[in-house]
Amino acid sequence: MRKTFHTRQLTFRQLEIFKTVAERNSVTEAAQVLHLAQSTVSTQLAKLVQTTGFELYEQIGKKLYLTGAGKDMLAACRDMFDVLDALESRFAQRAGLSVGHLRISAVTTSKYLVPNWLGSFCRQFPEIEPEFNIGNRAEIIQRLKANMDDLYIFSHLPKELDIHATPITDNPLVLIAPKGHHLTTCTNLSWEHVRKERFLIREKGSGTRHAVEAFFNMYGAPLMRPLGIASNEAIKESVVAGLGVAIISRHALSHMAPGNLVELNVKEFPIPSTWYLVTPKGKAMSPVTQAFSTHVDAMLGCK
């Protein structure tokens, strides 16, 4: 006798809960995102398992891992919510962009830029519901591969993926030292004057690290005693503490107390870099996403 699967008895709320849990591998994190009690999330997951007749996940420690059936369920959830988002976008277009959602994921250094863009956009369209995710480059690439968001922001493009990228603004990488460092009083500095300093750089895989390594390779000079650090804030504090000099985005200096850090005037700097708005190739921009892109262009004076 053929087994019957009661998939039409599933509710959108249950699917939203499952999708959130699956994407975060955690009931606790999903409950926080959805503003629900953990017991409510666990109960809805149990009902999903009962309705489908399949184990959808395995729990190892505090993390959840999807089974084959769970992966099928997650793919179906994403497809269904994409269809609903497309419908919402059409409604938003009819309403003159008075409603809608906008999901953006961006690499960490963009946190010095994107909130300003998003805040300005939401003031113009107050009924738009934004979601802004920040992560390291590897995390944002995974979200891009899974098509989890409307728009992605990178400074170093993931060339291994089939994407559409629009350059939006410069991301100059500058060389900084602590106040009182012996190089801060020098003029006419060149790369040869600084290459033997201890460099503090972002972790492997970050967009800034890619650009810095390309720069060193161009000059045929290996990094001298590099110290990899996983955040711009930690790099800045480490430079102030005298652990070395660093190459970071000039945008990351905007939130530092004036005078603690000095941008060195070195002939080969700043290293050129660019911020990009990225979507999977072939993905149509929703009216809300297109409006945000146009808004950012206008803010930055892009032509």
Image (spheres, rainbow, N blue to C red):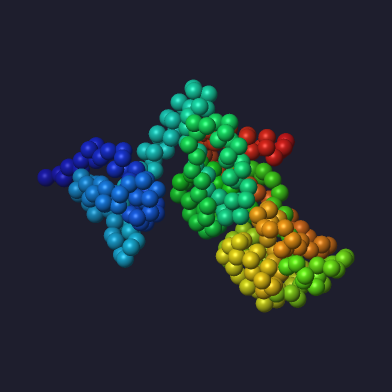
Q: How many marks?
A: 0
Q: Residue furthest right?
A: 188
Q: Position of residue 21 (x, y in %)?
A: 35, 51
Q: Looking at the rendering, which quadrant does residue 26 occupy?
A: bottom left
Residue 223 appears in view: no
Q: Residue furthest left?
A: 1
Q: Residue furthest top?
A: 94
Question: Which residue corresponds to the image point at 75% horizontal and 76% vertical from the top-left?
Answer: 196
Q: Looking at the rendering, which quadrant does residue 195 occupy?
A: bottom right
- Classify 110 as above or below 130: below
Which corner quadrant holds the N terminus?
Answer: top left
Residue 119 appears in view: yes
Q: Position of residue 243 (x, y in %)?
A: 67, 74
Question: Which residue corresponds to the image point at 49% horizontal and 31% vertical from the top-left?
Answer: 127
- Classify 244 as above or below 78: below
- Classify 200 as above or below 258: below
Question: Which residue corresponds to the image point at 40% horizontal and 48% vertical from the top-left?
Answer: 33
Q: Position of residue 251 (x, y in %)?
A: 68, 53
